[in-house]
Amino acid sequence: MPEVPEPKDMETIDKPIFRADYEMELVDSDWLKGAVKPKRFIDFIPEQCILCEGCVDICPWYCIFMVNPEAVGDSGNVELARQVEGGDILFLIDDNACTRCNLCVERCPTGALVQSEVSGGKKRGARAMGTVPQSQKAS
Ligand code: SF4
Ligand code: SF4
């Protein structure tokens, strides 16, 4: 019968080192806003969109919207309504909800969505937005 090894003496086991030199500090909320979000956003190229809705279907956070002209008019948002011409579909991504998971970019068959670096003027909370003529819709 094989010999059973003796259990290790507790004194010989390496014990984890616990640190006690942490300092509690209040985090500045403005710094946190900038730090949590990557400095990237999903950019939309309206000319390449064929309104297939693949991106809307795949987004896990439901932050891509394709709104028809009537809904834009009914919303009472004058600024948005001004940007939508007769038969255009308004396409927008809620940047606050978007996690930059990139699924929509990978799903898009035409390259209408790309992940871009935030530069200069684009502020947090802005929305990637554009209008797409319904005539671009793939049949
Ligand atoms: S990157 Fe992800 S979370 Fe953001 S719009 Fe695309 S699918 Fe949605
Ligand atoms: S952005 Fe791409 S995936 Fe989304 S509706 Fe347009 S063509 Fe389709």
Image: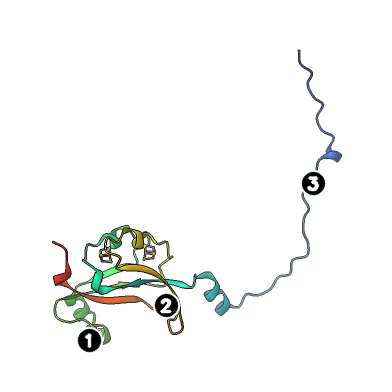
Res 41 → quadrant: bottom left
Q: Residues within 10 Å of mark 3 (few under 14, many from 20)?
A: few
Give the residue number, with chain letter if any, for mark 2. Answer: 125
Describe the element under mark 1 as helix, strand or loop: helix
The x, y position of residue 76, in whole percent, is: 23, 83
Residues tagged 1 and 3 counted as in contact (Cβ below 8 A): no
Q: Ligand 2 is found in which quarter of the picture?
A: bottom left
Give the residue number, with chain letter if any, for mark 1. Answer: 82
Q: CA distance from mark 1 to mark 2?
A: 21 Å
Res 29 → quadrant: bottom right
Amino acid type, residue under disc 3 in the picture = Lys
Give the residue number, with chain letter if any, for mark 3. Answer: 15
Q: Quadrant of the C terminus?
A: bottom left
The x, y position of residue 72, in whole percent, is: 22, 78
Describe the element under mark 2 as helix, strand or loop: loop
Residues tagged 1 and 2 counted as in contact (Cβ below 8 A): no
* Left or right: where 89 falls relative to 38: left
Q: Quadrant of the N terminus?
A: top right
Q: Is residue 73 above or below residue 62?
A: below
Q: Is residue 82 above or below residue 115?
A: below
Residues tagged 2 and 3 counted as in contact (Cβ below 8 A): no
Of mark 2 and mark 3, the one earlier in the sequence is 3
Amino acid type, residue under disc 1 in the picture = Arg
> Looking at the image, which residue is at 26% across and 73% down?
46
Q: Is residue 93 above or below residue 107?
A: below
> Looking at the image, which residue is at 42% across and 61% down?
101
